[in-house]
Amino acid sequence: MTTPLPLLYAQHLARDRRRSAHTVRAYAATAVRLLAFLQSHWGGPIARDALAKITPADLRAFLAHRRTEGLSNASAARELSAVRGFLKFACGDGAELPRLRGPRVKKGIPRPISPQEAVALAETVSEEAREPWIAARDWAVLLLLYGAGLRIGEAVGLTAAVLPLGETLSVTGKRNKTRLVPLLPQVRAAIDAYAEACPYALSRDAPLFRGARGGQLSSGIIRKSVQGARAMLGLSERTTPHALRHSFATHLLGRGADLRSLQELLGHASLSSTQIYTAVDAAHLLDVYRNAHPRA
C-alpha cells in the first residue's frame, strides 16, 4: 500500500528537519488541504509529479478558498509557507516552484506584563487548584515561564531526570536545540516543593510535571487555568503563559541584558527573533514617559 504524500511529508519534517510535533501536525494538515483543493480544482486525483505543474494562479485560488474559511493575513502567510515547504519536498530541490508573494502581515510586538501581575497570576492559578499538590505544580510551572523564560511546551516536556536541581537547567527547545538556563532560588524551591508533594513516582525517564491522573501534564491545562485567573484579576486577554516568557525577556533587557545573551537564554535560532524585545522596551519607556511627564 502506498504511503500518502502528506504522511511522508510529516515523517520528513519530524525526522530530517527536526520540527516540533505542533509544526508537523500543522504542515501536514496544510498538505492534506492543498491536495483536496487541487483535486476539486483540477477535477481529478493528484499524482506527485503533477504538483510540479502548479501555477501561481492555482496557489492564489487555494488561498482565496482558505480566506472564505476565515483565515487572517498572518494565518494565510503561514499557510503559504507550509505549502511552499510541501511542494519543495514533493517536487525535489531542483524543481522550479511558482512564486507568489504572501499577504502583508503587520508585525506586532509581544505584550509583557509587570512583575507584580506575573506573580499575582501564578498565585491565583495556584490558589484555584483543587488539590495542594496541583497547586504546587502550577506554581512551579508558571515560575519556570517567568523566572527562566521557558516556553510552555518546554516546561511540560521536562523529565524527572532534571532532579535534583542545580543552579542551571538543561532545556530542549525547538528543533531539539538544547540550552542551559539559570534557575533562581525561588524557582528551584517551587520545583522541589512540587516534587515532594507529587503523589506519583518521579522516575528519571518519566515526565516531571504530571496531570491529575498521573500522565504528562498538558499545556492546555495550564492555558485554561491562566485564562480563568486573568479574568479574575481583570488582566488582558493577551495575558497567556507565553506572555510570561515575553515578560522574562523584556524585564531582563530593561535591566541591561545584551541581545546575544538574551538570545541564548530564550533559545532563539536567530538574533532577529530576539531583537523584537528592543521594540518592547522602547514601548515601555514611551508609556512611562507619557504617564509621568507633565507635558506629555
Image (cartoon, rainbow, N blue to C red):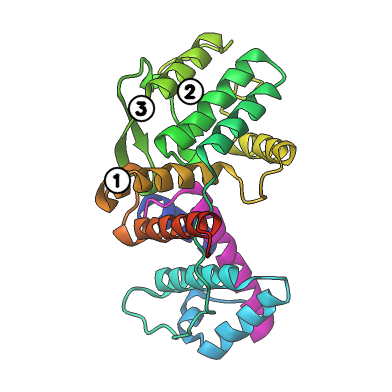
Distance, label 1 to label 2, CA atoms, is 30 Å
Q: Nearer the viewer, residue 136 or 80?
A: 136
Toward which corner of the image does residue 251 lie, by quadrant? top left
Residue type for callout 3: Leu
Q: Which mark is residue 208?
A: 2
Question: Can you give x and y, in whole percent of width and height, for residue 31 in the image?
Answer: 55, 67
Q: Nearer the viewer, mark 3 or mark 2?
A: 3
Of the 4 image quadrants, the one containing the N terminus is: bottom right
Between disc 1 and disc 2, whose residue precedes?
Answer: 2
Residue type for callout 1: Ala
Residue type for callout 2: Leu
Q: Residue at x 48, y 70 (%)?
A: 81
- Using the image, determine if residue 85 lies above or below residue 220: below
- Tell me which segment is drawn in magenta: 17-44
Residue identified by numbered label 1: 257
Q: Is residue 41 left or right of residue 100?
A: right
Q: Residues within 10 Å of mark 3 (few under 14, many from 20)?
A: some
- Using the image, determine if residue 60 lies above or below residue 105: below
Is residue 157 shown to the viewer in this render?
no
Question: Can you give x and y, in whole percent of width and height, for residue 41 in the image?
Answer: 66, 84
Q: Residue at x 40, y 46 (%)?
A: 249
